[in-house]
Amino acid sequence: MRTLIRGGRVVTAGDDYTADVLIEGERITQLGANLLVPADRVIDATDRYVLPGGVDTHTHLASPSAGTVTCDDFFTGTVAAAFGGTTTIVDFATQFAGVPFADAVATWEANRTGKAVIDVGFHLAVTDLEGGGGVDALAAMVDAGVPSWKLFMAYKGAIMVDDDTLLRVMQTAADAGALVLVHAEHGDAIDVLTRQALAAGRTGPDQHAATRPPEAEAEATNRAINLARIAGCDLFVVHVSCGEALASIRRAREAGWRVWAETCPQYLFCDESQLSLPDFEGAKYTFSPPPRHVSNQPLLWRALADGALDQLTTDHCPFRWADQKAMGRDDFSKIPNGAPGIEQRLMLAHHFGVREGRISLQRMVDVLSTTPARLFGLAPRKGSIAVGADADVVVFDPAREHTISAATHHSAVDYNLYEGMTVVGAPETVLVRGTPVIEQGRLTVGPGHGRFVPRAPFRAGTTHVAEGAVA
Ligand code: URP
Ligand code: ZN
Ligand code: ZN
Ligand code: ZN
């Protein structure tokens, strides 16, 4: 099967040129002006951008949390992702207490199989090092294609780990070549503030931000950075929300420490005042870290532009407002944490980032696709338009208007954080490994088109060199 994408403006993290793209089977095989080759399918990309498919390395599909399960499974979640121009996700397989690491990944892989329409990798979220099998079982996850491990420094009494565990996992990562991800919030401080708020009768969603101050994020970010330095491991700080945490990251990077970080659209577009919306509407904004004062938004945009933040992911963690968020109607601490957004990332970044002059078009491609693919072991197959790469391609119409709404989005969640926003620019055709999955606003593959993608380790380990490791 040969597909020719004709006459589009090919935009990668490093280039911007007009060319035809030839796809044979699942790979890109030729790039050039006016390619004279017969094709089974021709996609006219005149006046369109031809972008590498989005890589979203932070999602939570079919994920148990706070007594319920995120409401998108690997079908609805990846369909929503595909409509938004994302062709690969890396989802968090949570290892709950007592569960061997390999079993946690097997559970997520079973959830994915026969459902996902785009390609899927997994991180491991480590909550119980001994119960998972200890450091050797953890190191073995690198060879299973799961070379990135998240630790929660918050959610005390549930999935939080102590600093003892954090440091030993970091040492194991340094040894095995894995990347350590941290949810950086000071869990003990949040626990004290939460109990005090509830005891004083302050039970509404507004207390979500009041009990998780920016200093709690800054402290944990700084602690994780220093522990990673002690362990000699590479660190990735997920969902950075505020200037205070960003300052720690900037300082470490300026010193040449091996620290990377991301933010998410909800921190660029939502703010803490929305937690006070009447009639429990504020519960839609209970994600962690919480939405911050609006003054943080330009700091995060600037960091995306200047490279202090490496990537923009969604942390898509959808809970229906009507019945799932409602579990915490009388107690904000029982509201399941997380926000949806897997479909809107590219449209928001293009409209508010590129069109409004906050980031360049090439930088947008970099933070949505190229850098996530590189940091998380998916390059060179994913993250670029290049000969030999997987034909994961978005034909993007930069002039098409789209109004975001829960009535038309493809997630199973019953609200949208960006309800009513009109953006200019939207994906038109989306291909995963050469097969169109979205065409003319319709899904054109069935469940199960997506594959598991084993990922390469971040770097060769010091003593344990994984099979296929890149130095
Ligand atoms: O509130 C959030 N972000 N929920 C998802 C889990 C996490 O902490 O990333
Ligand atoms: Zn987190
Ligand atoms: Zn998350
Ligand atoms: Zn090995």
Image: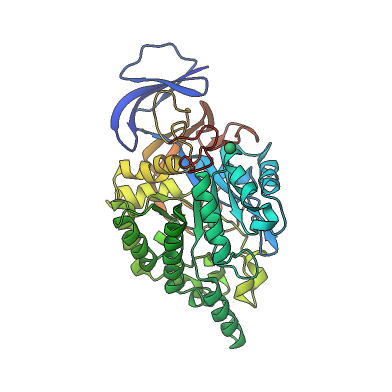
Q: Position of residue 396 (x, y in %)?
A: 40, 36
Seen from the viewer's position, the closer of residues 330 and 133 is: 133
Nearest to the observer: residue 268 or residue 128: 128
Quadrant assignment for ligand 4: top right
**Above or below, comparing residue 436 to residue 455 in the picture:** above
Image quarter where the C terminus lies is top left
Q: Is residue 383 left or right of residue 72?
A: left
In this rendering, the answer to whether 262 lies above or below 226 is above
Question: Where residue 6 appears, x then y in whole percent?
Answer: 38, 22
Residue 266 to residue 57: above or below: below
Left/right of residue 266 with respect to residue 93 in the rendered view: left
Residue 137 at x, y percent in the picture: 65, 47
Lateral position of residue 234 relative to residue 257, left or right: right
Report which quarter residue 120 is drawn in: top right
* Residue that extends furthest to the front in the rendered view of this protein: 463
Q: Looking at the picture, tell me which residue is in the foreground, 458 or 19.
A: 458
Color encoding of the figure: rainbow
Looking at the image, the residue that sits furthest to the bottom is 200
Q: Nearer the viewer, residue 15 or 217?
A: 217
- Numbered label tally: 0
Residue under the image location 54 percent in, 80 percent down? 193
| Residue at 61%, 59% in the rendered image | 319
Residue 104 visible in rendering = yes
Q: Is residue 205 visible?
A: no
Question: How far across and how far down the image is residue 220, in percent?
Answer: 46, 67
What residue lies at 55% left-to-right and 75% top-to-bottom? 188
Location of residue 161 (image quadrant): bottom right
The residue that appears at 29% across and 45% down in the rendered structure is 360
Q: Is residue 112 above or below residue 94?
A: above
